[in-house]
Image: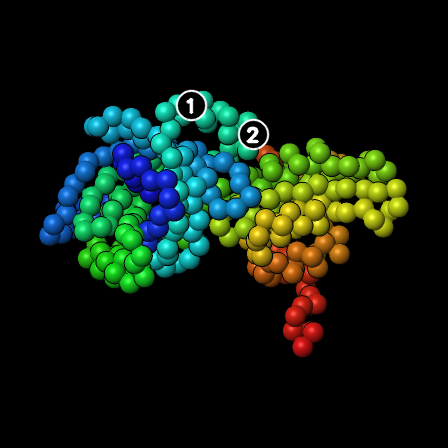
């Protein structure tokens, strides 16, 4: 997203899509040839994403010919391979470094996205031509929604520009998700929460971290009880927190144990994970920075009992 110096406190919306761009020079030429397009030049942006219980939260620090500025942006957007609607709130920040340190220490910083962005404006659509460190070249379209629009006009304009710019398949998720894709962020979250586990009887602490389709990471630790059946596995703790936060789907899982390099979920937790995950949902077992055993929920629990069995 690119908001420049715009200041918005109420909930705002846009319609957006993102694609990988194999030929940025050609895309820029096509964009500059559009009737009525305005070239706003290049912007350097640094987005720091923080852990949240829902949606995404990032601190954007940016600089261009007009100077430097920063905004805290909270937004929600479905991860779909099509143009999708995003809702967001943002606040201008006068001291971004201090806020970044405060949020990192209290919430935890997940990933930093550095990019060079060429910004062009057409109608109410922002055309972003991005070079993202560690990811490559992308083109992004964002139609800013005004008033109580039903989004028809915004979708039509994004579709028109997609055709004019000859953009390919849509990339779901955000740049932060692409940088975080894989096990390490989840394993780190599972490892951190494992250190808070209550393992007074087994001395076998376990941590689990779950990612939702909107990028939220939720973690839980094992909690034991003197009456052994009343204890709770880390996966169950994480699922409870996930549901309490209003989520209903798991897109990835990581499990870390202090005393095992690879700690697979028990049978009961495999069934619990199956309730909110798909057979192809990845499960990462290991330690941050160490060897990782990657599997899926379906591989862990073939022939799972599900809602079809109840029918």
Which of the image's four quarters has the C terminus?
Answer: bottom right
Q: Earlier in the sequence, mark 1 or mark 2?
A: 1
For residue 67, above or below residue 210: above
Under circle 2, the secondary element is helix
Residue 172, given in percent of the width and then of the height, sits at 41, 53
Residue that protrudes farthest toward the bottom in the picture: 311
**Numbered mark located on residue 106 in the image:** 2
Asked if residue 232 shows in the view, the reply is yes
Q: Is residue 252 visible?
A: no
Q: Residue at x 49, y 41 (%)?
A: 180
83 to the left or right of 178:
left
Q: Residue at x 64, y 47 (%)?
A: 241
Residue 114 locus on image (x, y percent): 37, 33
Q: Which residue is mark 1?
A: 97
Q: Residues within 10 Å of mark 2 (few under 14, many from 20)?
A: few
Residue 243 in picture, x, y percent from top left: 62, 52
| Classed neighbour count for the residue bearing mark 1: other residues with Cα under 10 Å, few (<14), some (14–19), many (≥20) | few
Q: Is residue 44 left or right of residue 47?
A: left
* Element carrying mark 1: helix
Number of marks drawn: 2
Write the residue at 55% across / 43% down: 53
The percent coordinates of residue 219 (x first, y second) are 63, 42
Mark on residue 120? none
As drawn, is 240 to the left or to the right of 115? Answer: right
The residue nearer to you, when weighing 140 against 264, is 140
Label 1 vs label 2: CA separation?
Answer: 14 Å
> Where is the N terminus found, in terms of image quarters?
top left
- Residue that appears at 24% across and 39% down: 118
């Amino acid at each position: 997203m690119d908001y420049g110096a715009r200041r918005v406190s109420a909930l705002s919306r846009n319609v957006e899509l993102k694609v990988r761009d194999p030929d940025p020079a050609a895309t820029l030429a096509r964009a500059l040839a559009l009737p009525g397009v305005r070239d706003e030049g290049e912007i350097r942006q640094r987005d720091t994403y923080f852990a949240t219980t829902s949606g995404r939260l990032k601190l954007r620090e940016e600089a261009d010919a007009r100077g430097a500025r920063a905004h805290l942006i909270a937004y929600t957007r479905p991860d779909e391979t099509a143009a999708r609607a995003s809702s967001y709130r943002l606040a201008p920040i006068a001291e971004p470094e201090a806020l970044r340190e405060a949020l990192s220490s209290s919430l935890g910083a997940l990933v930093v996205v550095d990019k060079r962005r060429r910004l062009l404006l057409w109608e109410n659509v922002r055309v972003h031509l991005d070079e993202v460190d560690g990811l490559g070249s992308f083109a992004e379209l964002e139609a800013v929604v005004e008033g109580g629009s039903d989004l028809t006009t915004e979708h039509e304009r994004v579709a028109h520009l997609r055709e004019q710019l000859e953009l390919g398949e849509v990339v779901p998720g955000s740049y932060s998700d692409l940088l975080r894709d894989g096990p390490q962020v989840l394993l780190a979250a599972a490892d951190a929460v494992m250190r808070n586990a209550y393992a007074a009887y087994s001395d076998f602490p376990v941590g689990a971290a779950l990612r939702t389709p909107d990028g939220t990471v939720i973690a839980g630790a094992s909690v034991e009880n003197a009456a052994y059946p009343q204890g709770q596995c880390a996966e169950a703790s994480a699922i409870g927190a996930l549901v309490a936060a209003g989520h209903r789907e798991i897109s990835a899982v990581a499990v870390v144990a202090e005393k095992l390099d690879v700690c697979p979920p028990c049978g009961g937790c495999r069934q619990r994970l199956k309730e909110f995950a798909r057979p192809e949902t990845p499960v990462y077992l290991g330690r941050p920075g160490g060897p990782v055993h990657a599997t899926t929920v379906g591989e862990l629990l073939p022939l799972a009992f599900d809602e079809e069995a109840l029918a």
